[in-house]
Image (tube, rainbow, N blue to C red):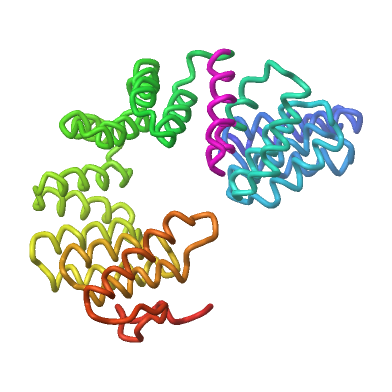
Amino acid sequence: MLLLVALFFWEGKESAQGPGEKSAGAYFRRGRSLYEQGHYDIALSQLDRAIEKERGYADAYFYRGMIHRDSGEISRSIADLHRAVELAPNSARFCIERGISYSSLYHFPEAISDFSRAIHINPQETEAYKMRGKAYLSIGEIDRAISDLTISIALSPHDAATFVSRGRAWKLKGLLPRAIDDFTSAAGINPWSYDAYRYRGIAHFAAGKREKALSDLSRAIDINPTEGEAYNVRGLIYSAMEDYDKAVDDFKKALDIRPHSAIYRLNLAGAYMAEGEHERADSEAKKAFEEGAKNARLYFKMGRMYEAGGFIEEAIAAYKACLKFCPPEYAHLKNDAMERAEKLAKSNGSAFSVFIPATFAGNPLNQEK
């Protein structure tokens, strides 16, 4: 109510002082202030009026684009930020924010182009290096990611999130000690960083240090108990330790948070399978298929689960589904699935083909959509 009264008073004051006061700049300043306070709807109306009065108002387009992105309207955000960049082509910040919006839509080549443009404008722009490094990480350009993130850290050595991103890159290269060092640096900068503890726990698990992994993941859960991934990874560790009751409990907690996660449900099915609860395992597996149709990694993981449980025909069918939906860039996954399926078919006394049985797990797989 106070906000509406204040807005009415402001508009009334502008009117009382004559048309000269109701300038594009006045509307813009009001819109920016409201945006910074989180009052997006009213801020949009003020920025709209600023743009109506001055079509070439770059800052108005910029802030309107930011509001659209914060409201989840990414395409509209990109359109406004594109106009802002057109009007102010030497603004590194405008390029960075448009790149971030592109990244939100997984349009990483466009995002990288924008971050590169920002670096060209200002070679000391740490955020541009950070965001370009994250974009490179997302498309598997690990060495480029590490290079950019290292420059960003040199320019701004107290950003925990950048250390986390570089740690993830080191882990993908298989350099676990370096990854753990970066995650530790992130935790030192920000002791409340969920990602620092979560990723360090994952790295410790990959290094075979299960107790340290459990400690880190439990700390991550304490920091943010509303995120499912730490529960999921801790469940995997308990499964590896053959403590299936705790594993089942963690997978269920992860599913409480993200009930439509096919991977979490599949991990729950795997824990049931390891316990000998085959009916429960099969039930959860079918639910996982319904949630994750056309997910190659999901089907590969399911194949491993059925293979471990001795269900050869189901395992072969899952590996075939993996082959069917495996994108070209996952050649290693495709080769592994092919080798496992052929080996199981041979051990089962049957010839291997890529046909998927119609009876497989409710058969969401034969439907080409």
Identify the residue shown where x is 35% and y is 68%.
Answer: 319
**In the image, 341: left or right of 251?**
right
Image x and y of residue 69, in percent: 62, 44
The residue range painted magenta reads 133-154
Identify the residue shown where x is 68% and y is 15%.
Answer: 124
Image x and y of residue 201, in percent: 27, 33
Magenta span: predominant SS is helix
Identify the residue shown where x is 30% and y is 85%.
Answer: 359
Residue 70 image-quadrant placement = top right
Image x and y of residue 53, in percent: 89, 40
Q: Is residue 128 above or below residue 48?
A: above
Identify the residue shown where x is 66% and y is 29%.
Answer: 33
Q: Quadrant of the N terminus?
A: top right
Q: Residue furthest bottom?
A: 358
Residue 90 on the magenta span: no
Residue 271 image-quadrant placement = bottom left
Residue 146 on the magenta span: yes
**In the image, 55: left or right of 185?**
right
- Total tally of numbered discs in the picture: 0
**In the image, 94: left or right of 57?**
left
Q: Nearer the viewer, residue 277 or 192?
A: 277
